Structure formats: structure tokens, C-alpha cells
Amino acid sequence: MKQLVDESLRTWQSLGHVNYCPTPNEQGSLLHRRSIYVTEDIKKGAVFTHDNIRVIRPGKGHTPTYLQVVIGKHAARNIKKEPP
């Protein structure tokens, strides 16, 4: 019975721990990721297109996974083009 308990514990430990957040070692590299940025001034109500938004570095904005969600949407407010 002791061997069963020991092997069960060892099996659970071998599964590891899932972590979906960046680890402390990854914090420095977050800026090297890409984000969505506007490439020109956008007025309230204008439509987001591939011409007025781009995915570039540094990673301080929304992740590129939202690009297809943003394309075709209307701006809720005026957005100024600012350097990344």
C-alpha cells in the first residue's frame, strides 16, 4: 500500500503545474512581442482597416490575436497616431 501511495504522489508531481501567465523570467521579453497600433489619426466613427492599423513592436497594446476582431469595427472615440 505504501508503494501505491508513493507512486501515486510521484505521478501527480510529474504532471507539473500549468501557468498561463508570464513567468518572472519572461517579464523582460514582453516588450519584444507585437501589438496593434494605429498608423494614422482615426476620427470617431471611422472604420478600422488594414490601412490604418498595423501589428508592430513593442508589445504595449492589444495582442495581434484581436486583429481580425478589430478590422471592420468603428472607432468609439478619436484616436491619435502615436509612436509605439
Image (tube, helix red, strand yellow):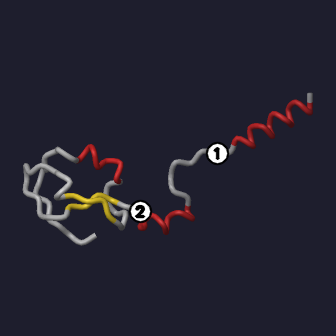
Q: Is 6 displayed left or right of 41 in the figure? A: right
Along the viewing direction, whichever of 60 and 51 lies nearer the viewer:
51
Q: Which mark is residue 37?
A: none
What is the crowding at mark 1: few (fewer than 14 residues within 10 Å), some, or many (at least 20)?
A: few
Q: Quadrant of residue 34?
A: bottom left
Q: Amino acid at mark 2?
A: Arg
- Return the residue found at the far bottom: 83
Q: Amino acid at mark 1?
A: His
Q: Is 22 displayed left or right of 76 in the figure? A: right
The C terminus sits in image quarter: bottom left
Q: In this picture, is 35 found above or below 8? A: below
| Residue 82, x across and y down, in percent | 20, 69
What is the crowding at mark 2: few (fewer than 14 residues within 10 Å), some, or many (at least 20)?
A: some
- Return the residue found at the far top: 1
Question: Which secondary structure lies at badge 2?
Answer: loop
- Return the residue found at the far front: 51
Along the viewing direction, whichever of 46 and 79 lies nearer the viewer:
46
Q: Can you identify the residue that label 2 sits on?
A: 33
Residue occupying image coordinates x 56% and y 48%: 19
Residue occupying image coordinates x 20% and y 61%: 38
| Residue 18, x across and y down, in percent | 60, 45
The N terminus sits in image quarter: top right
Q: Is 15 displayed left or right of 32 in the figure? A: right
Q: Can you identify the residue that label 1 sits on?
A: 17
